[in-house]
Image (cartoon, rainbow, N blue to C red):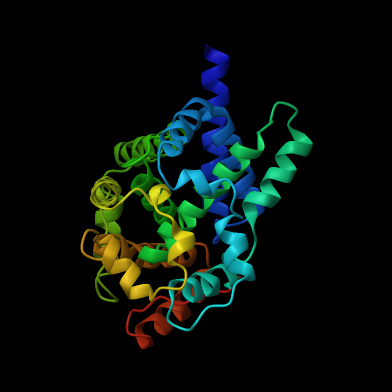
């Protein structure tokens, strides 16, 4: 039992280590850990989800179709349609790799117990597409806060132990950080007040998760929608029909991303010499308090 807990903790720690070291979380190193997390934690829950999915009318044709990503990559769509926008999204630098296929190949070559049936592979590909669609529709970035928002949104409709474990560790980590240094953000807000306001608090992660979960509850289950049939429809019609704009509000997430950008700037600032810091603050003031990328 102890060894199992130790192994599961190490998996989650690896995921968080990757999120901290990668600006773009849609990278092979991260996705390999995600596949390992899903394989270890979600064997039972994915089987339950698959059974639930197979009860849908859509499932009768789903397993005979190509994956959504393959259909979109090969298709031609009019400007303004859902298909055209999704194709642009999947061709953008952050999403241009089919990481499910890449990660699956690595997992099958390196992990002897990683065996999925063809039906399971197609369903897992749909799970990855669901993840990307949440990023796409709600403009959530490939950052740690963006990923936490996506997985929290997801488990509101379909519980997965891997996602729940990541969220749990994120909350515990935030709480422990507060216990270790409860006044760190207060001091930082006071120290930088003349340059710009920093509206960031230790409890923000709890608020972020609650709002993402509520958004997920209000919106339809992404896996239940036949996206193939809607590719040629105008994007705004698809969003309106599904109530995605009306039933979701990621305003707080967007505010938090801006505040974290400021925080990360000050963290990088703290690594520089006193002379470099003086120059950086001068540039920040001239930039009206808007953070800029600090080069190594």
Q: Residue furthest right?
A: 109
What's the residue at 71%, 39% (across, down)? Answer: 107
- Looking at the image, residue 274 sits to the left or right of residue 158; the answer is right
- The quarter of the picture where residue 40 lies is top right
Q: Residue furthest top?
A: 1
- The quarter of the picture where residue 291 lies is bottom left
Q: Position of residue 13 (x, y in %)?
A: 53, 37
Compared to 178, does 73 lie above or below? below
What is the count of numbered marks?
A: 0
Q: Position of residue 188 (x, y in %)?
A: 30, 60
Which is more toward the observer, 294 or 192? 294
Q: Residue furthest left?
A: 246
**Does residue 93 appear anywhere in the picture?**
no
**Does residue 111 appear anywhere in the picture?**
yes
In which quadrant of the rendered image does the C terminus lie? bottom right
Q: Position of residue 263 (x, y in %)?
A: 38, 62
Q: Position of residue 21 (x, y in %)?
A: 57, 53
């Amino acid at each position: 039992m102890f060894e199992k807990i130790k192994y599961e903790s190490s998996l989650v720690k690896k995921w968080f280590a990757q999120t901290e070291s990668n600006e773009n979380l849609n990278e092979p190193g991260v996705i390999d850990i995600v596949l390992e997390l899903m394989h270890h934690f979600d064997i039972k829950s994915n089987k339950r989800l698959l059974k639930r999915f197979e009860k849908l009318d859509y499932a009768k044709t789903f397993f005979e179709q190509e994956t959504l990503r393959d259909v979109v990559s090969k298709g031609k769509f009019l400007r303004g349609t859902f298909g055209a926008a999704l194709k642009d999204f999947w061709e953008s630098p952050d999403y241009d790799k089919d990481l499910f296929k890449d990660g699956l190949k690595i997992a099958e070559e390196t992990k002897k117990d990683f065996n999925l049936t063809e039906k399971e592979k197609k369903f897992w590909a749909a799970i990855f597409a669901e993840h990307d669609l949440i990023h796409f529709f709600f403009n959530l970035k490939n950052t740690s806060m963006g990923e936490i928002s996506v997985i929290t949104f997801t488990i509101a409709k379909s519980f997965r132990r891997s996602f729940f474990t990541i969220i749990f560790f994120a909350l515990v980590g935030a709480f422990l950080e507060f216990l270790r240094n409860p006044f760190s953000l207060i001091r930082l807000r006071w120290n930088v007040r003349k340059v710009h306001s920093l509206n960031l608090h230790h409890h923000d992660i709890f608020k972020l998760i609650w709002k993402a979960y509520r958004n997920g509850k209000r919106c339809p289950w992404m896996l239940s929608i036949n996206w193939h049939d809607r590719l040629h429809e105008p994007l705004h019609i698809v969003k309106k029909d599904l109530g995605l704009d009306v039933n979701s509000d990621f305003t707080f997430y967007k505010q938090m991303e801006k505040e974290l950008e400021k925080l990360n700037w000050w963290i990088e600032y703290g690594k520089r010499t006193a002379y470099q810091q003086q120059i950086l603050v001068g540039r920040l003031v001239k930039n009206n308090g808007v953070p800029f990328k600090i080069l190594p």
